[in-house]
Amino acid sequence: MSTLRIRAGRSAMALIRDGGFSLDAVRSYYGPASGPRWLIVSGFDRTLFSSGVLGNRHPVLLAGSSAGAWRFAAWLQPEPDKSYNALLESYLTASYHRKDSPQDILKTLGGIINTFLERDAVPFALANKKYRFAVSTMRCRPLTASERPWIQKGGFMLSYLMNILSPSTLHSFGERVIFYNGPKPPSFCLRSDFRGTFIRLSATNFRAAVLASGAIPVVVAGVRDIYGAPTGIYRDGGFFDYHLTHRYTERDDEVTLFFNHQERIIPGWMDKKRMKRRPSEEILDNVLMVYPSEAFVEGLPGGKVPDRDDLTDLIDEPETRIRNWWQAVRQSAHFGEEFLELVESGRIRDVVEPIS
């Protein structure tokens, strides 16, 4: 029994059903701001970069926020398997305590980044020929920029209430800032519907941009004044770009690959409880989404994908959390091989379903 579900937007579906689909059609791979849920995509990632199936004809854009950006930062390293394993090991075994302040947690996350981003390897990452990189962050406005908990919480609560009226109101609370490498900005940054700023990545700001992209509001302190970018406090890019909020391809015969932990696609962080919010049909048109089956998830420890609740629920039982998370990594290690078999055999045509 397959443990993966495959869904596709209109153009991606037509490409697959017509028999013309190959992984050369993948021009972008998006990594959502999924927190610890990213652990079940680790085997999928490692199979893709180890087999070298992406980026053979054209560079592939690796775009993401928070955990997605962290994963892809490891992809770009001279020894991606070594870097990715270091990320896994340090992320799973990091220590957290009840009395940790936001600054303490920022320091812990910075330590994780130091384990898998070797300083002398960043120039290599920026010059990577197979992959381009785009990191989503949020530059905060006054309320959300405050490190006083009650002011910051109030700012984000107000943004949640305003978002009920319209997602466009979120830009009153922060600015989307995309950090990128390559000869020119990613095409989604140049579209008329893009709202935000884009900044070139460098050896000086690479680590700070990746760290800021995972600085969860209220929980983690922000990253201040990233080199080359507008001054201010930078936080988790999932505020704007939680799952999918842009069209990452330019043509109908190009595909955005997207591994998600669930079937529902949520645009922004503040939309999690807005069940009717979803990306536009244009954004989903070229998307090929892969996610685990319900039966697979039920077989994970606790019957669920690892998430941030584990960090608080098991704060006094870190050994249990670490054991459960490693088990989830092991159980999902085959996802990449299963996906490649579906593509190479052509059976993906039989299992793909429309994005609902």
Image (spheres, rainbow, N blue to C red):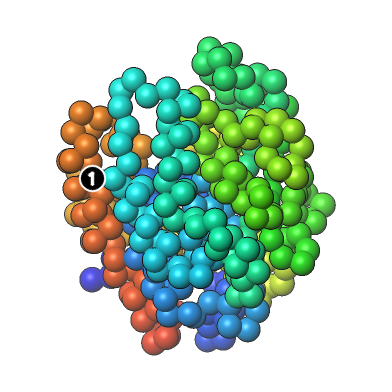
Q: Quadrant of residue 312?
A: top left
Amino acid type shown at disc 1:
Ile
- Write down the quadrant of residue 281 in the picture: bottom right
Q: Residue 54 location in percent, x, y?
A: 53, 77
Image-based side of 207 in relation to 178, left or right: left
Relative to 186, residue 235 above or below? above
Residue 233 sits in which quadrant? top right
Q: What residue sits 52% from the left and 36% below the top?
A: 215
Residue under the image location 57 percent in, 40 percent down: 212
Q: Is residue 128 visible?
A: yes
Residue 229 rendering spot, x and y as whole percentages: 74, 42
- The answer to whether 181 is drawn above or below residue 224 in the figure is below
Q: Residues within 10 Å of mark 1 (few under 14, many from 20)?
A: some
Q: Nearer the viewer, residue 228 or 219?
A: 228
In front of the other: 39 or 118:
118
Residue found farthest to the front: 120
Q: Which residue is mark 1?
A: 322
Query: Residue 247: image x %, image y %?
Result: 67, 58
Farthest top residue? 150
Total of numbered circles in the picture?
A: 1
